[in-house]
Amino acid sequence: MTDDEAPPTPAEMLRLIEEQQTAAMRRFIPDPLLMYVPWGVAWFVGFGTLFLGQGLAGDGNGLLPITWQVGLAVLWATQIIAFVFMIIALLRAGGHIKGESEARGAMYGLAWFIGFNAMGILATRFVPLLPQDTIGPFYTSLFMLVAGLLYMAGGAVYRLWPQFLLGVWVVVVDVVGTVLGGGWIYLLLAVLGGGGAVTTGLWLRRHR
Amino acid sequence: MNTELDPVIHAQARLKVVATLNTLPQGDRLAFPGLKDLLGMTAGNLSVHLSKLEEAGYVEITKTHKGRTPVTYVALTKRGRAAFDEYTKAIRALLDTAGGTP
């Protein structure tokens, strides 16, 4: 059976095309559950821990006796886990594909890498001039600004509105949290930032 | 209206191949094993269909090496994309005109 008969109806052929294309898209587009939800959870847990330690005033007298070092460690650990999930999703989706989207993905990935490193170096240069209790929010606000902007850029590159909107949302939450001052930035990023990323992942998964 | 269906694509297996490759952006190639898994075909069967599509100029097959193992990549050509577009249009037109008849 190498050259199968043409199937009976155009309707069946159309259905065949649609089914095959849906299956292909599911394979080629990284699983949104792995791409977004782990980041949302990481922000919820990580920024949530920082908030519990720092409190609304951001002075270290929060609900629980957690130092900022512990909070930061939790944030990084959960983000590393999220990063691993994301890489798994990317490898699964792109493992068999060569060509232009590889170059696009590499450039986009490099933008994140360069963005965060540059931000880290720049921020570290100015941190010694800042009062102690603003250092955490300072790093956090810049870090999430870079993340939000790159989500927007990614939305543009992959023409994915939900990703773009997540970027806008993260930047808005970041700005509002920073303007409110103290530990608000941690609280808002945990609940609204993390919630936004989880919602984006679930929505994209449902509508793929 | 005379809607002749392209005989190269008007066969389930080859239609599935073309529909799959058409989901990739222009300029991307798909490795043979990836295509095979996605279609649930045997390697032999898929090869036969691919060479028919290649003869028609609808797909481009490139063979390279990953270390020592040979890897084959498949991509839809511009002509293949156009043919698939034409085919889906023709099918839709048939469905519209047929509307109602068994």
Image: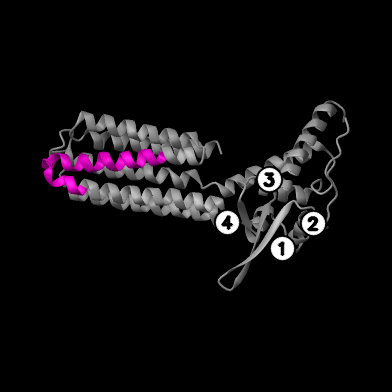
Residue A20 numbered mark, or none: 3
Residue B43 numbered mark, or none: 1
For residue A33, side relative to residue A143 (left or right): right
Q: Nearer the viewer, mark 1 or mark 4?
A: 4
**Residue ID at (47%, 55%):** A88
Q: CA distance from mark 4 to mark 3?
A: 20 Å
**Residue ID at (31%, 35%):** A191
Residues marked 1 and 4, same chain: no
User: What secondary structure is found at the residue carrying circle 3?
Assistant: helix
Q: Which residues are magenta?
A: A124-151
Judging depth in this view, the residue of A130 and A180 nearest the camera is A130
On the image, the x and y values in percent for residue A108 come to 44, 48
Badge 4 density bin: few <14, some 14–19, many ≥20, Cα 10 Å:
some
Q: What amino acid does circle 2 point to?
A: Glu
Residue carrying label 2: B55
- For disc 3, the chain is A
CB within 8 Å, label 2 to label 1? no
Q: CA distance from mark 1 to mark 4?
A: 20 Å
Q: CA distance from mark 3 to mark 1?
A: 18 Å
Residue carrying label 4: A98
Badge 1 density bin: few <14, some 14–19, many ≥20, Cα 10 Å:
few
- For disc 1, the chain is B
- For disc 2, the chain is B
Q: Is residue A86 above or below residue A169?
A: below
Q: Tell me the quarter of the image containing the N terminus of chain A.
A: bottom right
Q: Tell me the quarter of the image containing the C terminus of chain A.
A: top right
CB within 8 Å, label 2 to label 4? no
